[in-house]
Image (cartoon, coloured by chain):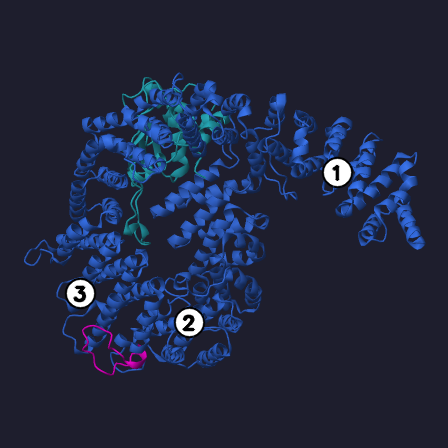
Amino acid sequence: MAADSSLLQSLVEEFVSGLQDSKAKDAATAVKDGQFTVLQLVEALGLSLTSTQPHTRARGVQLLSEVLQECYGNLTQREVEVLIAFYENRLKDHYVITPSVLQGLRALTKCTALPPGSAVSMLRSLFQDVHVQSLMLAERSCVYSMLINLMETREAELKGLGSDFVFGFVQSMDGERDPRNLLLAFQIANLIIQRGYNLGKFAEELFEVTSCYFPIDFTPPPNDPHGITKEELIETLRSVLAGTPKFAEFLLPLIIEKLDSDVQSAKLDSLQTLTACVSQYEHKDFAEFLEGLWTSLRREVFQTSSERVESAGLAAVTALTSCLSRAVLSSDSEDSLSTFLDLVLTDCKHHLCEPDLKLVWPSAKLLQAACSASTRASHIVTAAVMPSLLEQYSNRTQCSQRRTLLEVVLKFIQAVKTSQSLENEESVFIDFRASLCSTVFSALSENNSSLQVTATSLLTSLSQQTGLLLDSDIDLAVDHLIRLLLTESDDKVSLAVVECAGALAELHPTVFITKLIPRLKAEMFAEPMDQDDNRKSSEQPSHHAVRQRCLSVLAAVSIKPSVVKETTPVLLDVLSSAHTGSVGFSVDEVVMTCRSLQRIAEQVQDIEETGRCFHETIIPQLLSLALQAALQGEESSGHRSPLVEEVVLSAVASVISTSCSRLQPQLAAQTAKRTVALFLDDDVSFLPDNSFPSHIQLLKKQQGESWRQSQLVCLLMGCVCSLPRSVEVPQADELLSQLEEMSCSCSHTLSYTSAAKCFAGLVNKRSQGDSLDSLIQRMMKRVCGELDSTSSPVRTQAFTLMIWVAKALLLRYHPLSTSLTDKLFTLLDNSDLGAMAADGFSLLMSDSADILNRGCHADVRIMYRQRFFSENSPKLVQGFNAAEPEKKSNYLKALSNIVNKLPKQVQITELPALLSLLLEALSCPDQGVQLSTLSCLEPVLIDPPPALIQQLEALVNRLQTLICSPAMSVRIASLRCLHALSHFPTHEILPFRARVLRALGRPLDDKKRLVRSEAVQARGEWFLVGSPGGR
Amino acid sequence: MSGGTRLENANPVIFQRSGERLLTASDEDEDVHDPIDDREIFDILSYFDLHLIRAINDPEHPLSLEELNVVEQVRVKVNDAENTVGVEFTPTIPHCSMATLIGLSIKVKLLRSLPARFKIDVHITPGTHASEEAVNKQLADKERVAAALENSSLLEVVNQCLTNRSI
């Protein structure tokens, strides 16, 4: 014990007189470990605490406070009481002591053993003895955290202080300037308001002391270490100001005043605060300001200066209206909602009668904002507006005016849709049902495409409101849609019709099944009427277009299973008649049909009914057709089935792929089993129209026209590579070895590429382990053997297999992927394969559409591109430096392929290191390299890193050369880069102005218009550099 | 814009835009020579907005010269072979005080956007402005245009008109 006390004494000595700050830590640890108690510490401190030297006293208190900070948890209530009494007393002491005292008090506020009443006494002496704003930053923050701590734990006691607490707080924060402390102070104010502290007569003071910061204008210093953002301050201040209706009488005049400001952000902040506060208010809180608010809001929307201000203004109108709608009506008061809406209607309604003038839209938007607030508001507004809009529509004759009116009506209906929550409530528009319908149908029969487009969207909106379209109207609507589909050639119209048909079919499937589908089928199968006509050439494309539109409508309407059951047989009929040649369908149309099937597979509900439809009917049928087409080739009868074409097969493969990845895993597993059996064991039993020979042997090498059969492997790929990972691929080992064999031996491009892709897709999903490793090593050995022998006839094939497998492994971070990619790097030096290897990097880094993506349930880790880049860019730079001059372009191409695909944030951070290489790439004669480098430079130029600015001279020189390149795309890309350069800091680019302007003079007279228009824009911007009124 | 400013024409008539020029196959073809035509000049002019001339426009929902019908394609004449460009513009109201400024802006825009070989002529559509002749004379006078652009406050206004706000 004696040893302990002498140790303690020496600790105190060294801290107080020796000024060794580290001793406080030691003392704290010692107290925590129980070597001595706080009481002993105080006793040991005795002399220093009573010294006549304020600095010694300060040191003493500091030691005590620092120890308390570490071990406030172990104190007993009695100890705390004594300590608080001591500290309160010390607040009256010399100013140098105050910081340590506050620190100690803060530690004590965190104590759980705080005796009752001490919080109040602590605050009383704090408010009494300390003038917070004359303290330093850290001490002020100490006071705020004390308040926050006490508010968390002693709420009831503090509330007992009554409004004195609020007054004390107001006094302490009055004049605070540091954003860090402001954030704390706002939090306290927020707590005061949210927890219902008594504001007493100090509501105005609390408002004054916080609102003087509104609107917040704060830019954090560069490389801000504290991480305080303007948004954070705005949000917390807003929740203070908007927190209570007691502030209404002060806040609303302030908002009206700030809305007059010229500063955009002030306007925006005011509007958003208004929106936030009225949601808390009741009508009586802002009744007297209503007119003033409306005038300001109207001005902001009518003479708007930015889209954000406008939408904030509209949101405020909606919030105001919905607050007014909540007001409870009493018999003697006026109806405040209708008073307000009267204001809005008087100011806006007459503008709706001038569809040519500018204010139509702002007025309509204001009314719609009010309309969307509540059902009552929408009843009042629509009753006032709709009759005149609909009447005007029938009176006006100009199409542009009618279209504006129709669009306004459409927006009203859409606005009301958001406000109606109850499903089966009668629509607000029920009174205008008849005239709305007749307007829509008359617009649909109009001969103006933009009117038709608007009318179809209006029709969609009407169908989504309950009770607006009767069955007879739907019938009529479908007739109109069919007519437009078959006769209108405008792309925009048919797009709108397709969309509308999709929306209507979801709600009214039966009409579409009985009317639209049979009609479209008949239309598609009708032979074009050109047999003995010489208008053949003019008629043909339009019939083709009609078929295309029919196909996309069939896909669009197939959302409900009942509709899918009707549409898919039609599409399959198209395919089989195209195959047999009984009806002439072009390859294009066949591809389109497959796309429609795929779209249906993407959008139908994943239920058993649709799953069966796809897995048991559609896929077997597709496989059967493809197989028939492949086998038919040999006995060629003049007609060549479109199902042997590569585009068609790829489209069929994606139908299979989408259904296997998306619909019903158990059924997909069954499909996979059958498909694998078909390819490995010639099992054709599940195919319809079964008349196939017994030995097909699709994966074996064959003679003659075998490519027709071997390319079917792409269908196998579509099936097995897109299965969910829970589904086991049957006979996987056998399948993999056959695929490897095929991809290394076949000579038909589609066949060996598909086999390689299929192999890669399976490898990507195989579970980790020795069998996978040995599989890859076996394949590697074979591939490397082929690649290294210069005389091998299948080098391209081996390369293709390697690159796809490399991708598959790279995506899942497999450790063996590096050996493959390293091989790829060494190939860059190869004189035959170098260019191909450089292109291969683009494949490696980009998403592939058919396999190895998330849609196919492939194993794709996040950020694999960044990882690959950071692991390999040094190799690339090294290789570039070591390479012979004529091989360097391969490296540059590989580099630009990689960098191009990186996310922009990564590009910006990585760019400085690679900049010189990229600039080198700009002077590389290969146009592909130039183009891809330019395209990766362009986004970086928008927000230029400092490293780039240092290289400006070199960059401008290179770009100047490239704008005279023989390739148009290079000229365009380099002009875009020059354009982006004009937004650099003026002082950096001003020296180049004259030179660039002269250089840009030449492309103004380029022979290509697209180049000229880029040059015009770039030159216009460069003229503004450093010029008055420019930038 | 503070609330009190009165606009000379707060609620102007809006005309529909004609939409982007459609890309044709020959636009993409390296070997075809595209001559400079009326539409191209019109596009250069129609997409800049007189957003700072408040009298006819408000900022941001910028009404372009096309939407205000100040410039129409039929009033743009180009002869690529003879190196001439003629543009007629129509002020929104006959007493528009901004007519000279609009004309000057159009002229400057064309000077900056066309190859030097062109002779550029900008004037008011006959019969659409009170002081048509005076304005035309000013715009045709090379030296006066050059002198106007020496004036930095005038250049500032012109540049502001030509600043592309979308970026």
Image coordinates of residue A912 in percent, x first then y, are: 58, 54
Q: Magenta includes A770?
A: no
User: Which residue range is magenta in the image?
Assistant: A679-698
The residue labelled by disc 2 is A760
- Viewer can see residue B79: no
Q: Do tag 3 and tag 2 residues touch (Cβ < 8 Å)?
A: no
User: Between disc 1 and disc 3, whose residue precedes?
Assistant: 1
Q: Nearer the viewer, residue A58 or A866?
A: A58
Local SS, label 2: helix
CA gap, disc 1 and disc 2: 71 Å
User: Between disc 1 and disc 2, whose residue precedes?
Assistant: 1
Chain A shown in which color?
blue
Q: Nearer the viewer, residue A556 or A814?
A: A556
The residue labelled by disc 3 is A578
User: Between disc 3 and disc 2, whose residue precedes?
Assistant: 3
Q: Quadrant of the N terminus of chain A?
A: bottom right
Secondary structure predominantly adopted by residues drawn in magenta: loop
Same subunit, labels 1 and 2: the answer reads yes
Image coordinates of residue A783 in percent, x first then y, are: 45, 78
Image coordinates of residue A231 in percent, x first then y, are: 56, 38
The type of residue carrying mark 2 is: Ala
The residue labelled by disc 1 is A115
